[in-house]
Image (tube, rainbow, N blue to C red):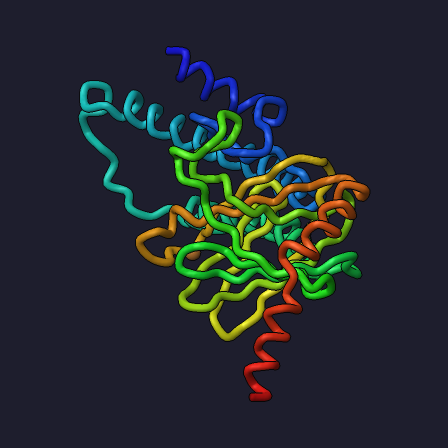
Amino acid sequence: MSKFLFIFSSIFISQAVFADQPKDWQLGFQNPASDGMRDIVNFHNNLLLPIIIAISVFVLFLMLYACVRFRASANPNPSKRTHNVTVEILWTLIPCLILIVMAVPSFKILYKQDTIPKADLTIKAVGYQWYWGYEYPDENIIFDSYMIEEKDLRADQPRLLTVDNEVVVPVNKVVKVLITANDVLHAWALPSFGVKRDAVPGRINETWFQAEKVGTYYGQCSELCGIKHAFMPITVKVVSDEDYEEWLSEARVKFAKEEIENDELKLASK
Ligand SMILES: [Cu+2]
């Protein structure tokens, strides 16, 4: 019963209840942490949901009305009529209008998300079977990001979502994400930022987000990519500018790409 109540209440107060990661018995979206996701959530809550509810209620009413009004005992001689031009025009025209009403704001959101503003920093995400590799091309940083096994989790870390090396980005900055893959199709997805792009071998897709709140955000590979598809999560840590600078200075040493390249050069010159 409590589960039912939770589902029921979460439909109406989902905004307030949910944080930055999926919750048990969650039905709605995660809390938006970017402008793009807020657009999506508003579009869903304020337009799609009312339309869905109105249509469902209307169809239910028609069914109940037909069951009662035309039941055999009350209506022993059914009408033989098969066509009604007015009704046929209406049930074609009204759904068309509903679709147009939905399409206009939907395209607006789509095109807004497709236009990448001037980026403050760029990261590159590469999908592998089965983990994510990240690069900060302007910072000479490269590292891999593996899921942490359940037995190694700390108490505050969510299962199947925590990784060893998180992506770290500063808050309120435009982050451009270049996405590709090295073996099969993957997809880089982060629900709270409203971001989801396919990672395609031999091709670079791009997307962007601007995180509004400091925190840790979780996503998952969203393209079926093999046996461990469910075990290559995405963790993005949004931090203040100072914390980001601090992380950068550590990461430049810990995850330096230069050495790898130098070794390759040395090998090549031999
Ligand atoms: Cu994958």
Q: Locate ligand 1 by image quadrant.
A: bottom left
Residue 27, given in percent of the width and then of the height, sits at: 47, 30
**Residue ranking furthest to the top:** 1
Question: Looking at the picture, does residue 171 appear above or below residue 197?
Answer: above
Look at the image and tell me whether residue 65 can be seen. Answer: yes
The answer to whether 76 is drawn above or below residue 236 in the figure is above
Picture mark count: 0
Q: Residue furthest bottom?
A: 270
Name the quarter where the N terminus is drawn: top left
Q: Residue at x 67, y 38 (%)?
A: 33
x and y percentages locating residue 242 in the rendered image: 81, 42
Residue in view at x 46 percent, y 33 percent: 153
Viewer-side residue, 64 vs 82: 64
Question: Is residue 92 positioned above or below 161 on the image?
Answer: below
Q: In this image, 181 relative to 139: left or right?
A: left
Residue in the image at 38% along x and 52% along y: 229
On the rendered image, what quadrant is the C terminus found in?
bottom right
Q: Based on the displayed image, in which of its 4 quarters is residue 149 positioned? A: top left
Q: Nearer the viewer, residue 83 or 112?
A: 112
**From the viewer's perspective, is 70 left or right of 213?**
left
Instruction: Pinpoint residue 95: horizontal percent, then vertical percent.
Output: 49, 47
Q: Depth check: give the residue in front, 93 or 170.
A: 170
x 54%, y 34%: residue: 21
Percent position (x, y) of residue 42? 65, 37
Question: Can residue 98 be seen from the camera position used here?
Answer: no
Residue at the farthest front position: 270
